Amino acid sequence: MPVTPADGLVIKALWNVNNYTMSFDSDGGSAVADKVYAYGAQTEAPAAPTKKGYVFDGWYLGDVAYVFGTMPANNVALKAKWSFDKFTISFDSQGGTPVEAITQDYNSVVTAPAAPTKEGYTFAGWFLGNEAYTFTYMPAENITLTAHWTINSYRLKFVDAFGDDFSVSTVEFGAAITAPADKPAKEYYNFVGWSLNGNDVVEDLGTMPANDLTVYPVFERVTVALDKVGDSTTVIDKENAHIQPPVTGYIYGLSERLTEEDLRANYIKVNGDGEIRVTKVGSFKYLGTGTKIEVVDRVTGEVVEIYYLIIFGDVNGDSIVNATDASIINREATGKTSWSSASSEAYDYCKVLAADADRNDSITADDFTLVTKVTMRAAKFDQSTGEVIPNA
């Protein structure tokens, strides 16, 4: 039965506070443990979760950012909100043209930049480490890509005097340019060296440029000048010439009864693009002392050298040492003529050289005696020196 107090009675209710749960949905991020709070207790945000490629933007209750305060009288389910993080792809062109870095949201589509360029090379792609990189989506980290290159090769051509191919090869960019061992030839010219512009000789051709290259030969014209044939006894004397230019000297070391054919075949020749003109003394059959040799440049038509032949002992120019020559020498030695005197209008140095048998620069009775011995076959002239040598 209910108890009825005699007097007024106050009855007081007792309450126990309820506990509620605050749960966290990381939405793909790192896990966050639920928390249990008593109703009205002060709540606090847990350590922020992480998610690769994203930035944590806070906890949301529905579409509203949640503000931690006192625990309500109900369970609370919070969900993480994320935004894309931004990452950068940097480019190392390895000596090529610079490429601007790409900064985009994680997982956004990335388009490859325009390929860089590098002189002498072909771009072979972007690499991440040792692997070729394929552009798809922005990764969840900053990366640096390195350009790979393949070296180019170009055509190296050496041409001859006529512009035709002399040596053709393929050479890598930057490699040393090496001239061929063989040298091009051009008639009447000497090869001087190779040129990159066709004019200036370059000792060091440098390295292969980033383009095909043609290298040109440079020649210099062989000076048109008289020379002796091979190992002949010919002596071409320019230093001791006593006649004014353009006469430049004398030729000796020849033989008696010298024909033009023998002279050209066995004694003298022309270096360069020139020719020899021969003018005999009078109407003699052979080429004797005083025979004129002109060297003509066939390109310019100019007479560039003049020589006179000396057959020692032959004074009259018939190429034979005989009594006629001895008589001419005797007359000069005895003063009946004056062709050996430089002050005489009749001066003829060719005759002086041919008649001066004792090599003392004057015509005397001794010269007459020596030449007479030669005509008598008691001696002979060494045509290379002018010396009279007794016969054994």
Image (tube, rainbow, N blue to C red):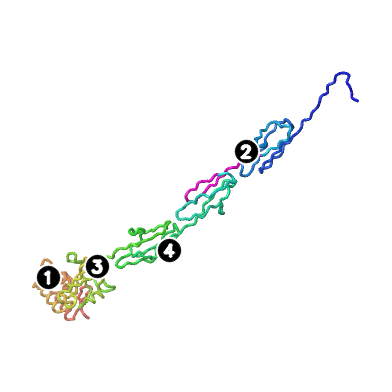
Residue occupying the point 41% across, 61% down: 156
Q: Nearer the viewer, residue 344 or 182?
A: 182
Above or below: residue 296 compared with residue 104: below
Amino acid on which disc 1 is placed: Trp
Q: Quadrant of the C terminus?
A: bottom left
Q: Which residues are magenta?
A: 80-103
Q: Quadrant of the N terminus?
A: top right
In terms of sequence position, does the residue under pointer 3 or pointer 4 come before the other? Answer: 4
Give the label, 4 or 2, closer to the camera: 2
Q: Is residue 217 toward the left or the right of residue 111 in the image?
A: left
Q: Nearer the viewer, mark 1 or mark 3?
A: 3
Q: Name which quarter of the figure residue 164 lies in.
A: bottom left
Which tag is nearer the camera, tag 1 or tag 4? 4
Q: Is residue 246 left or right of residue 140?
A: left
Precedes in sequence: disc 4 or disc 2: 2
Q: CA–CA distance between discs 1 and 2?
A: 126 Å
* Of the image marks 1 and 3, the number of the one nearer the N terminus: 3
**Label ID, residue 169:** 4
Residue that mark 3 sits on:
298
Q: Which residue is mark 2?
A: 57
Q: What secondary structure is marked by label 4?
A: strand
Q: Give the labeled residue for mark 1.
A: 339
- Real-space CA distance between mark 4 and mark 2, rounded to the nearest whole angstrom: 66 Å
SS at circle 1: loop
Q: Can residue 45 be seen?
A: yes
Identified by mark 3, the residue type is Arg
- Categorize mark 3 by other alpha carbons within 10 Å: few (<14), some (14-19), many (20+): few
Residue 270 in picture, x, y percent from top left: 26, 70
**Amino acid under disc 2:** Asp
Q: Please identify, in this view, whether the residue under mark 3 or under mark 2 is nearer the observer.
A: 2
Relative depth, front residue between 365 and 212 = 212
